[in-house]
Image: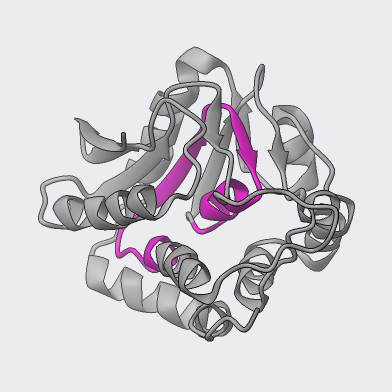
Amino acid sequence: MPRLDTIGAAAILNLGEGENRFSLDWMEEVNELPDQVLTGPPAALVTTGSGKFYSNGLDVAESERPVQLQADYVHHVHRLYRRFLTLPMPTVAAINGHAFGGGALLAMAHDYRVMREDRGFFCFPEVHIGIPFTPGMAALVQCKLDPAAARDAMLTGRRTGGADSVRAGVVDAAVGAEELIGHAVSLATGRLPGHPATLGTVKSVMYAPALAALDLPHRP
């Protein structure tokens, strides 16, 4: 179950101990927890997991044919990405294990990403599992990565560990397991804005095309 803890000036949103797939109940909880953070006193947010996974992504079955995602389900997924993309505080994904598909996209919605150097893969496997990117999901990747990095990540579905993920440009750092949370907290709290509301506005302006795409109704 998702839960909140605090380390210094940072809230730690733990996504859970399992695969942390995007069930409707799980998304509702994760979407609501930042409300508690925004009431203070934490001034930054770090997300992580407790087990083998950061998040294994969408809660749908793979198929030999392209999966037709339901409009209501996609609405909830997109709402979660929009929430994290515009939070008026520094955000860091501390990727404790595998981040696949929708879970990797959730990490992309943060300002910064840190991986363990010794365990876990970062991957957009959509081309291998029959789940096409929605326009909003594609726009989220493309607003965070340079064109070549986005092309390679989205078209190949290649899995990258910590060091390779840094080289590929999908994460900012790879550190040891014992350093992961501390590094993420330092990264987040070292970038506190003087005016948090303005930070939220700046994010909304920076990522306006992605936010608009994430707000589009999904048509299966």
Q: Position of residue 37 (x, y in %)?
A: 19, 50
Position of 166 with respect to 45 (left or right) is right
Quarter of the rendering occupied by the C terminus: bottom right
Q: Position of residue 40 (x, y in %)?
A: 11, 51
In reply to whether residue 184 is colored magenta, the answer given is no
Task: Classify 21 as above or below 19.
Answer: below
Numbered disc total: 0
Q: Return the residue found at the far top.
A: 178
Residue 140 seen: yes
- Tell me the colour scheme of the image: one colour
Question: Which residue is at a point 41% across and 25% down the rendered structure image?
Answer: 17
Q: Name the image quarter holding residue 163.
A: top right
Question: Which residue is at a point 44% across and 30% down the rendered structure image?
Answer: 49
Task: Classify 98 as above or below 203.
Answer: above
Q: Position of residue 19 (x, y in %)?
A: 52, 32
Quarter of the rendering occupied by the N terminus: top left
Q: Position of residue 90 (x, y in %)?
A: 36, 54
What span is colored magenta in the figure? 83-109
Residue 195 seen: no
Position of 212 with respect to 24 (left or right) is right
Question: Which residue is at a point 84% across and 56% down the rendered structure image?
Answer: 127
Q: Along the line of sight, which residue is nearer the eye, 122 or 59?
A: 59
Task: Classify 124 as above or below 50.
Answer: below
In reply to whether residue 93 is colored magenta, the answer given is yes
Q: Along the line of sight, which residue is nearer the eye, 203 or 72?
A: 72
Question: Which residue is at a point 58% across and 27% down the rendered structure image?
Answer: 97
Q: Name the image quarter holding residue 86.
A: bottom left
Q: Along the line of sight, which residue is nearer the eye, 82 or 199?
A: 82
Q: Name the image quarter holding residue 144.
A: bottom right
Position of 163 with respect to 34 (left or right) is right
